[in-house]
Amino acid sequence: SMRSAQASGSGQSSQALSSLEGAIARAPDVPRYRFHLARAYAGLARYADAREQFARVRALDPGGPWEKLALNAMVSLPH
């Protein structure tokens, strides 16, 4: 699949992605997991996926520290 081809550039990143995606499947409302997933996507140049996860983080933690982290991280993504 295209997704696995993209991720295969870095075995470590794709391993991290799998474990984060698994953690999110079990705990979808934990902003920390989604924040790290978004960072992992950004590291793989999957910026649309990263933005989507940062947006979810912000929605899960309105006014909180994770929302601020996600906002700052989104601003630094390439446009």
Image: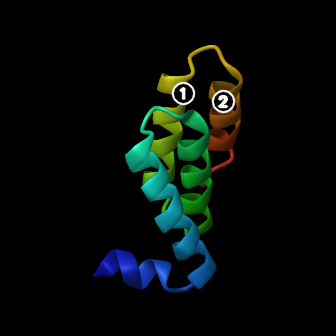
Q: How many neighbours does mark 2 have within 10 angstroms: few (below 14), some (14-19), or many (20 or more)?
A: many
* Residue type at tag 1: Arg
Tell me what residue is drawn at x 56 percent, y 34 percent: 31
The location of residue 13, given as percent across then percent down, is: 59, 73
Q: Would you name the residue on which mark 2 appears?
A: 66
Q: Nearer the viewer, residue 22 or 77?
A: 22
**Element type at marker 1?**
helix
For residue 3, what is the image quadrant? bottom left
Q: Look at the image and tell me whether residue 43 can be seen.
A: yes
Say few, some or many: other residues with alpha carbon within 10 Å of mark 1 (under 14 / 14 to 19 / 20 or more): many
Residue at mark 1: 58
> Does residue 50 appear to the left or right of 71 in the view shown?
left
Residue type at the position of mark 2: Trp
**Secondary structure beneath label 2:** helix
Q: Residue 24 placed where, x, y %?
A: 45, 47
Question: Of marks 1 and 2, which one's residue comes earlier in the chain?
Answer: 1
- What residue is shown at x 62% (from left), y 65% (from top)? 43
Quadrant of the drawing holding the N terminus: bottom left
Please give the label number shown on residue 21.
Answer: none
Contact between labelled residues 2 and 1, with CB atoms less than 8 Å apart:
yes
